[in-house]
Image: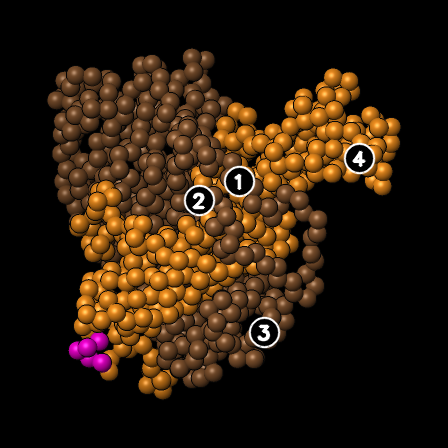
Amino acid sequence: MNNRLEKLLPVQDVRLDGDVDQKGLREVGTSTPRRDAISHVTGRTVYFEDGTFPGMLHLKMVRSTHHHARILGIDFSEAEKTPGFVRVITHRDVPSNYYTILRLIGIEPNDEPVLADDRVVYWGEPIAAILAESPQAAAIAASRVKVEFEPLDAVFDVEEALKPGAPIVTRQGFNYFRYEGHHCRRVRFGDVDQGFASADLIIERRWDTSPIEHAPMETTGCIAKPDGDGRFTVYTNTQALYFSLDNTALILGIPAGRLHFVGGTVGGGFGGKVDVIVEPIATLGAMLTSRPVKFVYTREEEMRISSTRAAERFYIKDGVMRDGRIVARQITLYVDAGAYSRHSPYGTTKAAAHMPGPYTIPNVWVDAHCVYTNRQPSSAMRGFGVTLGDFAIESQMDVIAHELRIDPLRLRLINAYRDGDMKAHRKRVEGAALVEVIQKAAELVEQRLDPDLAAMSSASR
Amino acid sequence: MAIVKGRGFASVNYPTGMNLGGDPTQALIHCTTLGDFVITLSSVDLGQGIKTVGAQIGAETLGVPVESVRLDLGDTDTGPHCMGTFASRLTHRAGNAIIMAAKEARQTMLEVAAEELEVNATDLETDGRGSIQVVGAPSRSISVMDVALAAHFKHGKTISGRGIYMKPKSEPVPETGEMDPDSAQAHACTVADVEVDTETGEVRVVRLISAYEIGRAINPNMARQQIIGGAWMGISHTLFETTAPYYPSQEHAPGDFNEYLMPALGELTEVDGAILQRPSSTGPFGAKGLGEMTANPPIGAIANAIFNATGVRIDHLPITPERVLRGIEALAANPDRAPSIPQKSDAGISDGLIARPVNNF
């Protein structure tokens, strides 16, 4: 099976001046077969949803049908008549309704309700949870709940959301995350104005991206089961068991010791299962009914309700010299967090830390804004804070190379960061290998590099 | 119809570990009666392969065959704390925790073996095949299984170990953004060759050739699989996917895989290149995080290859056939002007010119 794979992407050592080799490794560096490959491809791997328990209830969310609205009233009377209906859960049943996932690492404020109380700020926001004897009964009952909305103006564009008079998404009264008193995460290194003044050319571009779904094969879900001893076992496909457990305990106002989370095998995550969304409400359902409760997203919920990768907008202004040296880079980034923080304030800081890319530029200025809009919240996704920045930066590098009529690999190599350089966030570079991967890539596609480029090393300048 | 060909490049770095650190992971390890080792983590395996690379790291450190090491994952009653499986952190964080735990277990294992062989523990070595022997006198040896049995039933000792890895949390300086965000940086350069159909706007990625520098490939085939899978996701991000086809409009949001476009088998491409190793000073056996980054360099490389093929610079992901065609039309209508798809720009910075001399700015 692996014969073909073995022939691809050969492994080669890079040993630069001063690097120490580690010899005599026996297991590390060998292509031991993946432990779960056979059980995955033969369908024998057990996922959370394979569990079923006597008396298990099914949870279906009643969701907002508006991007932004006041909730004037909810009528459950028709829903309650549905055969199989067991009970409804509203915000009044949630002991500590407002939370934010990253409060565990000190992020504030708690901005997101488990269940909406007086208003909704995105299409699909959960308002009430229906518990029923079957998935069908839960879905039918949820469809019979009548919510009276008063629609409000909504804002979808990150720059519109920051303008005076824009509809306000958050309860704080402004549509951005505040970083220690600043309206954005800042990086200031050198003096960009001076850099621009000394540059031969200024190159400015805007880059946009669109939201992306994680699209795991297994949708997000869990089963919460009362153990009979006052504890609850929650079978979940979370990517982070303790994120889920700790937040669930805080939301439910119970000691964490009453919760036992079981998982470990996830059918695709890509960052989409780091949000804590299904476990708190399912566990609350199990507490309120003393029965196991299953809450799993449909594919449509996964696509249209669960977090996406944020759309990001970049304005990049570069001061460049005719020989290709970049002497100043100014980046204004708008991250579309959607309606709530989730992991976006963290990802925006990560995006700022990643700038200005793997290049040594003496003057750097970054304003990275985490902006709230009336959109399905975005959150962590593979390459969080970096993937889209790389698109913008690497497209910008290509623009510069084209404008200066310089070989795009030369442009990258002469600006590449190397050991000992100072990054814009004032950490000294070590273990660099950008020069070496560019040289190797050129070699692989038989693109000859000029002697000065071929002789470069990350270990020296 | 014309098919035009182009080549594009992108070079990137990627940070290992949760941004700013402060994200510990612990490992416990114990030896069974018959000399197998169980590594217990509360981490999860979502396909990235900790069940396999964790066993390799544990086996290497213990000095025993990988077949005798297994991982017990995903239970908060038995597994010690793990921050989670994300941020290209688990091989690095859990790997280092496993090394620490395995060193402790190995020490006890050697002490028990020393008593059984009536030598000093410092004179012993593991052969990596399930035996412990006297350095320089391999005939004086004892199997790990016999050591485990002796520890359990004769000496009343537990061969076990505890490990944790944490990079202390860095707090950014608000004014300057000074911070220590990462434990290491992995690197990659991707070359994309594409073909663009100028009649339909469709882009075919002919091949993606990459050099990745990842510190150390703990399991080369699984590293290759990450790179191949990431290349697919990179193509998907560049050319296909979005939940908001007319972002920032919310209209036409897809609800299933019929409406949410992703590359199918026919849209896969040749992926090859090389894996380079410049070991990281912080990584387990020098490893850096590879998991997330493999989707990144294909995006810029493909976008740049499309420009190289057509002269059209698409500044908005995803690069759909519609955007390519509109770009080609705009270029034909005004060849002097930089190719760009018209976008709403309230900030007024981008006027479509891609370069201006300083004195005119």
Distance Cα–Cα, label 4 vs label 1: 28 Å
Report the amino acid beneath label 1.
Pro
Q: Residues within 10 Å of mark 3 (few under 14, many from 20)?
A: some
- Part of the protein shown in magenta: B331-335
Q: Is residue A12 magenta?
A: no
Mark 2 secondary-structure assignment: loop
Mark 3 secondary-structure assignment: loop
Q: Could you tell me what secondary structure mostly forms the magenta stretch?
A: helix
Q: Which residue is mark 3?
A: A456
Q: Quick check: marks 4 and 1 in contact, CB under 8 Å? A: no
Q: Is residue A257 above or below residue B360?
A: above
Q: Chain letter of disc 4?
A: B
Of labels 2 and 3, the one closer to you: 3
Toward which corner of the image does residue B10 lie, by quadrant?
Answer: bottom left
Q: Chain letter of disc 3?
A: A
Q: Which residue is mark 1?
A: A33
Query: Which is more N-terminal, label 3 or label 1?
Result: 1
Which image quarter is the C terminus of chain B in? bottom left
Q: Is residue A80 above or below residue B189?
A: above
Which image quarter is the N terminus of chain B in? bottom left
Residue located 52% across and 59% down the image: B274
Q: Tell me, what hue is chain B?
A: orange
